[in-house]
Amino acid sequence: MTTTLPDAPPRRLSLPVATLVGLLALAAALGVGHLVAGFVGYTASPFIAVANYVIDHSPTGIVKWAERTLGTWDKPVLKLGLGVVLVLFALLAGQLSRRTPRAGQILVVLLGAAGVAAVYARSDLGQISLLAPVAALVAGLAAFTWLHRIALPPDVVHDRGFDRRKFLRAGVGVVAGSGVAAVVGQVAGTSSNAEDSRAAVGPLVPARTAPPLPADADFAKLGSPPFITRNPDFYRIDTALVVPQIRAEDWSLRIHGMVDREVTFSYADIRNRPLVERRITLTCVSNEVGGPLISNATWLGVDLVDLLDEAGVQAGAEQMFATSVDGWTCGTPANVALDPQRGAMLAIGMNGEPLPVEHGFPARIVIPGLYGYVSATKWVEDLEFTKWDARQAYWLSRGWAEQAPIKTESRIDTPTGFAKVSAGKVRLAGTAWAQHTGVAKVEVRLDQGAWQPAVLSAEVSKDTWRMWWIELDVPKGTHQAFVRATDSGGYTQTENRADPVPDGATGWHSVTLDAS
């Protein structure tokens, strides 16, 4: 008599099942971590924390390459890249565990520990925020172990082997649970929506308004940018992977360090002061020659020096060390911040409305004449006066300069490079800037010909950019047009090309014209 034995359990997981075990465990970890982060600190979500860690600790060369190559797409690309790495890690955990779960469990613990370390390293997160990555680690490990046990039962006597339906039901449950957890965490983490608070601010009315704009403040009809950059078009360069959501009623600014008295201001304190309106052009130090990382806005706020005077900054203070709510830091020369002629502001409005959330709501620093990495802290919450050797700001610790006055530069905006034009009279238009000094002259030349003066727009302020246009006689063929600016101090920008690191790019911008 022949006895039919029960199907023996598989001796190892198939490739598809092992893959699913790893991916489902990753989903469980991320979902639960995001859920807990929604209640203990949104940026404590392991995925966000690890991405922020990468941003904070990337070598200068990589950061520079990303800004130059990817521009404002650097953060989406980072998220995509991190997602790919996590998926590959999950696949590896599954494939190494086809016979036994031990290797995969070790990898899950290592990945979870990386999340814990990333949260621990964040200065803007408290210890309670560690609950998010710890919960993610536990969830990922538990899901991996449970799914592996279902797919590869250890009991060969009483278990008939791989139960596909049971595994699929478990997998669907993990996916559904992870999805619900992630959604709940997202809702909880963003329920303190800064947009609602911003909408409730209402109109901001300046006590001191900026002078009316002259009719010829720009040559937009001739191809230059508009004098005022619309808020949605204003360049944005920062390290915030997730835009901080700070309600005005929860915000405050602390001024301390080398001061006679520590002071703290609420949003109401700032808004109830007489507000001043100024037009100021901001420039990013990463802007390449002819680059787009420059914009101009009408800012509304209070004179920063008035707030600093109330604190009584002590003699010997060398830098104003500013900290954003997301932990980013900025070092500004103290003498510049304290100069009443500089016009440094704590801004709460931009182009006639409260600051957009992505541009610093509730409040930001705006200081004319310095590159943004030392002058334009968004979501600012802390100003500490100290020595240069006592604290190193984010970019200073990465090799950028301590002092960063904006360099005199100019740009051809139209025609664009390699444009096909009709031979004869060709109009060129563009922008020049020398913030806090002012632009006195712009010149353009074709190939190696003589420099010809361009028509300048009205000077609105020495702290804003200035537009120009010119008509050149362009014969048939391929030609190169160059532009250079001279500032009000008599300095003419150099043709020598310099990298943005450590204190801003230099060189003449040019475009190639194909005339027929």
Image (tube, rainbow, N blue to C red):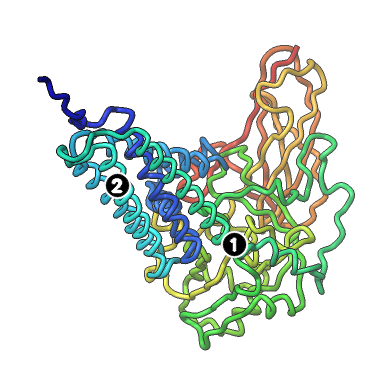
Q: CA distance from mark 2 to mark 1?
A: 37 Å
Residue placed most toward the observer, 413 or 442? 413
Q: Is residue 235 shown left or right of residue 81?
A: right
Tag 1 or tag 2, which sits nearer the N-term?
2
Residue toward you, 300 or 142: 142
Q: Does the rendering let one see residue 375? A: no
Position of residue 364 measured from the top left corner of the image (x, y, whole percent): 62, 65
Q: Residue at x 46, y 49 (%)?
A: 177
Q: How many marks?
A: 2
Tell me the residue that label 2 is attached to: 146
Q: Find disc 1 in the rendering and name its residue.
A: 245
| Helix, strand or loop at mark 1 | loop
SS state under label 2: helix
Q: Residue furthest right?
A: 215
Residue at position x 61%, y 51% from top? 283
Residue in the image at 29% along x and 27% along y:
15
> Image quarter for residue 247?
bottom right
190 horizontally vs 411: left or right = left
The quarter of the displayed image where residue 135 is located: bottom left
- In the rendered image of this protein, does residue 475 appear above or below residue 295? above
In which quadrant will I find the C terminus? Answer: top right
